[in-house]
Amino acid sequence: MIRRKLVNLTFVGDKYFNPFEVNGYTFYSQNPQHQQGARIRVYTSTQALRDNRRHKQNAYVEYAGAPEASILFRGGRVGVGYHNDRERKILEDLLVLGSVLTPQNWQLFSRRDFPQYPVISRNHLEYISKDAKKCKQYLDVAITKLKDASWQKQFENGFHLLMLLNHANILNSESRFLSMVVIWEWLYPHLKNPNGATPNDESNNLLEVFSFILKQFWPAQFNNSFRKSNIFHMLRNQLAHSGKLPINRTKAEPWMTKILWDYKDTTKGISDYLEFFDHLTQIVVLKTIGIDGEDSLKVFNFPEQLNSFLTMGRI
């Protein structure tokens, strides 16, 4: 039996979780013996912020036998030097999937000195799996998708999952938004052509890209009337070409130019729209691996905001 230390496996309200098994890998919470007899301390917001930045070795995984090769990192290798590098394994795929299902960067403790190691423990996604039991259910669904040959062909072995996680670790909200738009541009040809996207399937028309994907996943709710006035199309052009906010593009709808950065009165701010787009992109990517996560974001009123956006073009 092989045991590997893990960091940042955290769920809502569960500092320690019950063991769960996925694809031959059993995940365990770190034994909390060192906490016994510790003094009770008030957990402040400052401490919570610091915990979101610190990597904590709080779990481990056990498995037996020769591990399968990675699908997400197919052909990739990790290590330093010709004699020390090794093939990446499917355990790393599970860590990516776990990171996409939670706002935590699941990592191997042994990789902490590698340059690709995340800067902080928390990414800018949200909890779709709020406990270990739900996480196992979703990981089982996701790993089945990853192993499907037709899925691998359509989505190039799940490259968009790596994109989402990398982009979710961008700390600046405006830069993160622009990078998230790239995921939509990538998804468009891959959803359009399940037999394998080609350059002929791509589109430079962002309005078409957004509309196609929204109709793909929410056909009954999507309202074609706001197709030509999608605020995220305007936000992308504003940031890409002007680099500053609020929106002042001549082709923008009047209501878009009146939106301030923060929420005011009953009007959502641009920061709210950027946060909504983070959530929307996470949900869209999860749908490609068979997971419907909208209801998991009720705490952010995401289902209501999504319905408003799909029908009226605003949240």
Image (spheres, rainbow, N blue to C red):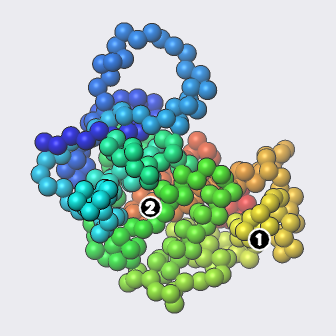
Tag 1 residue: 241
Q: Position of residue 246 (x, y in %)?
A: 83, 58
Left or right for 60, reference 130: left
Measuring from the top left, give residue 4's x and y in whole percent: 25, 41
Which residue corresponds to the image point at 31% horizontal and 30% vertical from the top-left? 30
User: Picture coordinates of residue 257 (x, y %)?
Assistant: 86, 62
Q: Secondary structure at mark 2?
A: helix
Q: Residue at x 46, y 86 (%)?
A: 198
Mark 2–mark 1 distance (CA, rounded to whole Å): 27 Å
Residue occupying the point 63% across, 79% down: 208
The amino acid type, in three-letter code, at marker 2 is Leu
Is residue 86 at all visible to an observer of this figure? no
116 left or right, relative to 167: left
Classify mark 1: residues with Cα within 10 Å, few (<14), some (14-19) or many (20+): few
Q: Earlier in the sequence, mark 2 or mark 1?
A: 2
Q: Depth check: give the residue in front, 258 or 240.
A: 240
Q: Residues within 10 Å of mark 2 (few under 14, many from 20)?
A: some
Q: Quadrant where the C terminus lies?
A: bottom right
Circle 2 is placed at which residue position?
A: 162
**On screen, residue 75 above or below 78:** below
In the image, residue 285 above or below residue 123? below
Residue 104 at x, y = what percent? 46, 43
Q: Secondary structure at mark 1?
A: helix
Quarter holding the N terminus?
Answer: top left
For the residue pair 120 and 44, the one nearer the viewer reads as 120
